[in-house]
Amino acid sequence: MEKRLFLAFSITLVFFMVYSHVVKKFVPQPVAVKEDSRQQTKEVGFDVLPSGVSQEVVSLDIEEKEENIDLPQASVGNFIVTYSPAGGYIKKLAIGEEEYELPFQNIGFLPEDKEKEFTFNLKRNAIEFKGPQGEKKEFVFKDYVLQIKLDPPPVSPIVLFSNYLSAKVLDQRYQEIFYSQGQKLKRVSPRKIKDSDLSNIKFAGARDRYYAVSLLEGDYGLKWVNSDKKKSHLYLMAPSKETFLYIGPQIEKELKPFGLQGIMYYGFFHGIAVWMIKLLYLLHGIVGNWGLSIVLFSISVSLVLFPFTSKSSKAMRKMQQIQPEVEELKTKYKDNPQKIQKETIELYRKYKINPLGGCLPLFFQIPVIMAFYQVVYRFIEFRGASFLWIKDLAAPDRFLSLPFPAPVNYLNLLPLLLMAMGIAQQKITTSSSTGSSQQKSMGLFFAVFIGIIFYGFPAALTIYWLVQNVFTLSYQVRLSKAQN
């Protein structure tokens, strides 16, 4: 058993290495921005900023100023906008019916205006600010595009947005800063961004778990300023009269019209994840429910992998049947490990058993489940989607409320079903085996361990794995009856 697990691990590792080598040419890879911007220009080929553009950026110190101030809010377009008459800019944005607060703040802040008091005019899809010297700023929302109008255009850099690190550790993993220069889309962790000047930029922005903000395609000179590890600011160095930002969900149909679909990224198995999403959309178009789409998606994957599952189940069954003979060899040659290994191999040849046959589904399932894991945690369509008793597929199923403090204030039923399924599967596969009680105990432990691991996972992921187990268990029951 240990040798087969080691071989399975080795094969999987080789697969990852080959896969990484193949896809790295096609999938944008993260890069770290160097601390010194002049050195960065030399290392990665950045051009210097156009002559005449100020390299000096005033420190963004508005957080302290507004710490104890309640700013006004208004519903504008698709957003709940928190805006500041002092300075005339958008402080915060929330989106969706549940008012999901975006980490993209201080939109349109001009440091030189921080002491100015602006009058404002609210419209259905716009906020208009007028300054004391007649200067105007207008923020116009149309669907997920924000148009920033400046009259007259300022001569100093303006903050397009500040990117704040989420307070939730899980969400921090999915935050990213990106920019497109030449033909390359480069990605940087918000924690690693350093002060840097960028020119000849096609577009740039940031994203969190579900949403993104990005300049629409153009030719920009930009400057990243890192205040600390919790926030950074993107400055537009030479603001024009009009600037356009996409602020919305990371959905291909919304991003593609602006040529921004490349900012979507699902990690190491990005290519597999993209096809998963296409299939999920197709199934949803047929059944009209995301939970049922996941069930059908899992069945589809099971059918594709069925030839390997079948070979695996048969190989494991045969190995259980010859287990008594293996134990005899271990007893007979207990002082000669080489002889045990040689005789065991001959035994496998005699019964035409491939020791790696039981590892085939694992070999193919690992990239699939890892890709689907990334999809579940980024796919905005799962947020708030209901199925059976589940109110949100992007969260644990929360079958029953419990009178305990978080995180045990809910009973999650799906992981318990998964645990029961694993125990049943172990009993069926080992019912006719005379293998060691230690191996059987390890199998049961593994089944319980999987249930514990999945307990805090989103319902969408648990549904997928549960259906996979139901499919496998059904086949094993049928195989067991056929051979008895």
Image (cartoon, grey):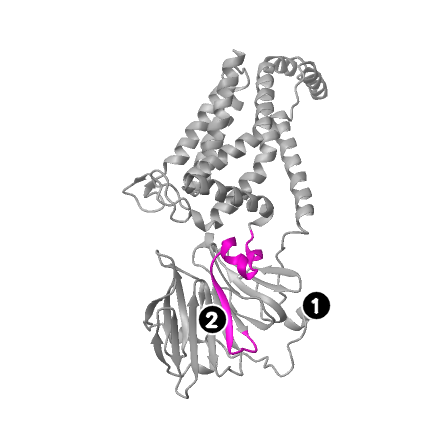
Considering every residue shown, the one lying at the far top of the view is 484
Task: Give the Cα distance between marks 2 and 1.
Answer: 31 Å
Label total for image: 2
Looking at the image, is mark 2 or mark 1 earlier in the sequence? 1
Q: Which residue is mark 2?
A: 147
Q: Nearer the viewer, residue 451 or 94?
A: 94
Using the rendered view, name the quadrant where residue 306 is placed: top right
Give left or right: position of 352 versus 57. Answer: right
**Left or right of residue 9, residue 296 in this image:** left
Residue at the extreme front: 286
Q: What percent of the width, then of the height, locates residue 38?
A: 66, 73
Task: Give whichever of 404, 160 is nearer the camera.
Answer: 160
Q: Which residue is mark 1?
A: 45
In the image, is residue 74 above or below residue 456?
A: below
In the image, 92: left or right of 315? Answer: left
Instruction: Please provide percent x and percent y for residue 77.
Output: 38, 65
